[in-house]
Amino acid sequence: MPLSAYLIVSAILFTVGVTGVLIRRNPLIIFMSIELMLNAVNLSFVAISSKLDSADGQMFVFLVLTVAAAEVVVGLAIIVSIFRTRRDIDVDDMNLLRG
Amino acid sequence: MTGIEIAFFVLAVATVASALGVILFRNAVNSALSLILTLLFLALFYLQLGAIFIAIVQILIYAGAIMVLFLFVVTMFASEASDTELQDRIPWQRWVAGILGLVLVGALSYLLFTGTAIDSSAIATGGSLSHVVNTQGNIEAFGLALFHGFAFPFEVTSLLIVVALLGALVLGRKA
């Protein structure tokens, strides 16, 4: 398959993620859309790595995966603590840094 | 049409459909399950591209560990997690976001087709992976590249994980 085919799929996935962040009000689904964007970039990294016949892209994917795991852990902890202090989950209500 | 092309198109359609499921399902549990499906399809893409280790890690870490964490939090707040009762205070945002999404995918595709092609010097400097894969093996090639060129980022990663662990502990503590 040509490289551009993979990049097109990656672009579509990234756009789906961006649209998800914009249209959803539930913070958990916004978070999942961010994961979708990270994965879209990972796909283009692996595709370009295979095209260039170099392992560097796979290294970047490995590091992105680690960063994504750390990000999910901290982000979900923040969301849980927000849920604990206030019961509504609309992101439009969370416009203050203090509870 | 060869088998690889058919596999690619089936995978591409399935991946985009399940990704759309993530953002369109009303219930957050359905979204999380759809995201797991998307991650599995992406792992199949990685297998098709020859990145075996990345595919396995994608399934183990992403579809396994990270999504289990997601599903835990989603089910913890299952009663509130479906946002059907949330009324949208900015109703036009949905349509503007859809239009802007189309603009973004159009711009990205335009850039992909008109942008400069990969110059052959990049391939010449990079071209060693397939040789190492053939002589040493797939996982060995990954490990050699990781610990020769990326040893420092790899070590910094451990620091990042410790910080994330401490952060989650502090945030999860009963205040």
Image: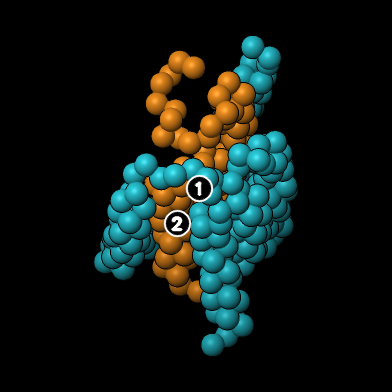
Chain colours: A orange, B cyan
Instruction: Classify mark 1: helix, strand or loop.
Output: helix
Most foreground residue, B25 or A52: B25
Residue B9 left/right relative to B34: left
Q: Quadrant of residue B137?
A: bottom right
Which quarter of the rendered picture does the C terminus of chain B lie within?
top right
N-terminal-most mark, 1 or 2: 2
Residue B173 left/right relative to B20: right
| Tag count | 2
Evaluate if marks 1 and 2 touch, with contact meaning CB atoms under 8 Å apart.
yes
Q: Residue at x 52, y 65 (%)?
A: B16
Amino acid type assigned to the residue bearing label 1 in the image? Ser
Q: Residue A82's spot in the image, x, y percent?
A: 56, 25
Instruction: Classify mark 2: helix, strand or loop.
Output: helix
Most foreground residue, B61 or A48: B61
Say whether residue B143 is visible.
no
Q: Residue at x 51, y 57 (%)?
A: B24
Label 2 marks a residue whose chain is A
> Which residue is label 1 attached to?
A33
Q: Residue B174's spot in the image, x, y percent?
A: 68, 14
Label 1 marks a residue whose chain is A
Q: CA distance from mark 1 to mark 2?
A: 8 Å
> Which residue is label 2 attached to?
A16
Query: In the rendered view, would you say B35 is above or below B81?
Result: below
Query: How many residues crowd mark 1 within 10 Å: few (<14), some (14–19), many (20+)?
Result: many
Q: Residue at x 45, y 56 (%)?
A: A16
Q: Residue B163's spot in the image, x, y percent?
A: 60, 21
Say whether residue B27 is visible.
yes
Tell which residue pokes out farthest to the top in this image. B175
Amino acid type assigned to the residue bearing label 2 in the image? Val
Tell which residue pokes out farthest to the bottom in this image. B1
